[in-house]
Image (cartoon, helix red, strand yellow):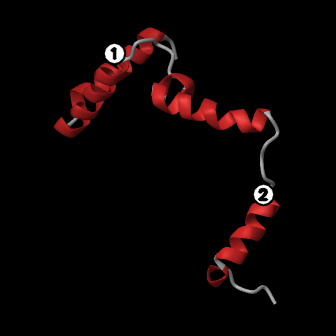
């Protein structure tokens, strides 16, 4: 479907839409138009504070200062044993 056909399809849908649908479409356009860049990737949809927190969390990973999943599970099961059912 080309651009012109898509525009025509949307126009037909808008003509038949109820108020709720039109408000949703309007909101989508408002959000899209208020973006700083047309790039809608995840990287650009997170806040600066979130990006900073992610970057800080990756530092120990880069330095190989992490704890294995198995060790974390073992310690968690010891600490919160009442929440883990015995498999036997």
User: Tag on residue 69?
Assistant: 2
Q: Residue furthest left?
A: 19
User: Tag on residue 23?
Assistant: none
- 44 and 47: which one is in front? 47
What whole-number distance in Å separates the C-alpha atoms at marks 2 and 1?
Answer: 43 Å
Q: Is residue 65 above or below residue 14?
A: below
Q: Is residue 55 left or right of residue 71?
A: left
Q: Residue 83: horizontal and vertical position, in percent?
A: 62, 80
Local crowd size for mark 2, using a 10 Å CA cut-off: few (<14), some (14–19), many (≥20): few
Kindly identify the residue that appears in the image at 67 percent across and 75 percent down.
79
Question: To which quarter of the image does residue 62 belong?
Answer: top right
Kindly identify the residue that appears in the image at 22 percent across and 26 percent down.
15
Name the residue that disc number 1 marks. Answer: 33
Q: Residue furthest bottom?
A: 88
Q: Nearer the viewer, mark 2 or mark 1?
A: 2
Q: Residue 20: horizontal and vertical position, in percent?
A: 21, 39
Local crowd size for mark 1, using a 10 Å CA cut-off: few (<14), some (14–19), many (≥20): few
Question: To which quarter of the image does residue 27 belong?
Answer: top left
- 84 and 58: which one is in front? 58
Of the image marks 2 and 1, the number of the one nearer the N terminus: 1
Q: Is residue 52 left or right of residue 26?
A: right
Q: Is residue 86 above or below residue 35?
A: below
Q: Residue 5: horizontal and vertical position, in percent?
A: 43, 14
């Amino acid at each position: 479907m080309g651009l012109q056909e898509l525009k025509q399809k949307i126009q037909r849908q808008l003509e038949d839409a109820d108020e709720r649908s039109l408000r949703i479409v309007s909101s989508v356009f408002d959000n899209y138009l208020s973006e700083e860049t047309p790039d809608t990737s995840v990287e650009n949809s997170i806040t600066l504070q979130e990006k900073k927190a992610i970057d800080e969390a990756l530092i120990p990973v880069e330095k190989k200062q992490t704890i294995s999943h198995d060790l974390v599970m073992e310690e968690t099961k010891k600490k919160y044993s009442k929440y883990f059912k015995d498999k036997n």
